[in-house]
């Protein structure tokens, strides 16, 4: 126990001795994934890619609601066979709609993860570039608390915007 305390004190003393030369930065990764140019471009790309399926789901939802309203409104005006057929049609539409929504959510989640991984890879390269250029010893991507003085998120976002402009 005594040796453990001595080791901790020794590490603290060694850390404070070189702390003056130690340059630390912190990056808010969530903010980079929300606000950077590549992240916004990826979001628009995904929206465009999935807009057709979204419209198809909305169309199926409208068909389902219309058929439900027809069954409720004209329940007494339909023959027993027509009523059963409409109920089967409604049930099939509901099953199809649930399947379409589930597949949409799964595919959307997968595509978002793919695009965010690409953005994160570019962000990591930007962070590494900043670290080398500005002589950082340590850059953390997540922290419970970050002093605004060491937050370099804006630099990373600007670097990604410049990188995007260079790659056009």
Image (spheres, rainbow, N blue to C red):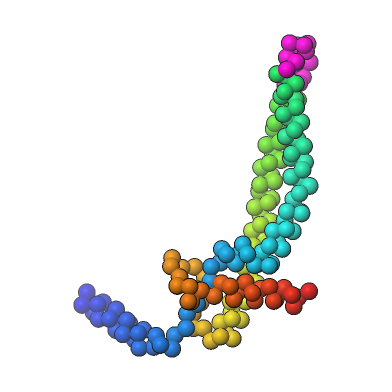
Tell me if residue 2 is in the magenta stretch. no
Tell me if residue 75 is in the magenta stretch. yes
Q: Quadrant of the C terminus?
A: bottom right
Left or right: residue 33 compared with residue 61: left
State the residue in front, 31 or 95.
31
Q: Quadrant of the N terminus?
A: bottom left
Work out whether 160 lies above or below 95: below
Image location (x, y in percent) of residue 45: 74, 59
- How many numbered markers are drawn? 0
Which region shows up in magenta?
73-87
Residue at x 59% of width, y 76% of height: 155
Q: Quadrant of residue 120?
A: bottom right
State the residue in front, 31 or 5.
31
Left or right: residue 114 compared with residue 134: right
Residue 139 in view in this figure: yes
Q: Quadrant of residue 22?
A: bottom left
Work out whether 34 lies above or below 71: below
Residue at x 56% of width, y 85% of height: 134
Residue at x 43% of width, y 88% of height: 21
Left or right: residue 19 compared with residue 160: left
Q: Quadrant of residue 34?
A: bottom right
Residue 124 in view in this figure: no
Q: Main secondary structure of the magenta part?
A: helix
Image location (x, y in percent) of residue 14: 34, 86
Left or right: residue 18 compared with residue 85: left
Residue at x 66% of width, y 42% of height: 102
Image location (x, y in percent) of residue 153: 56, 72
Work out whether 40 lies above or below 5: above
């Amino acid at each position: 126990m005594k040796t453990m305390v001595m080791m901790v004190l020794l590490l603290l003393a060694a850390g404070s001795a070189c702390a003056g030369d130690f340059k630390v930065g912190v990056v808010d990764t969530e903010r980079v994934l929300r606000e950077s140019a590549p992240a916004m471009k990826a979001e628009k790309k995904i929206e465009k890619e999935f807009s057709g399926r979204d419209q198809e789901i909305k169309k199926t939802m409208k068909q389902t609601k219309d058929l439900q309203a027809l069954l409720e409104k004209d329940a007494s005006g339909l023959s027993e066979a027509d009523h059963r057929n409409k109920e089967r049609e409604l049930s099939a539409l509901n099953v199809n709609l649930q399947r379409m929504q589930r597949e949409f959510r799964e595919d959307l989640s997968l595509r978002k993860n793919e695009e965010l991984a690409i953005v994160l890879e570019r962000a990591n390269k930007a962070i590494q570039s900043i670290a080398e250029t500005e002589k950082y010893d340590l850059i953390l991507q997540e922290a419970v608390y970050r002093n605004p003085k060491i937050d370099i998120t804006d630099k990373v976002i600007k670097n990604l915007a410049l990188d995007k402009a260079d790659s056009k």
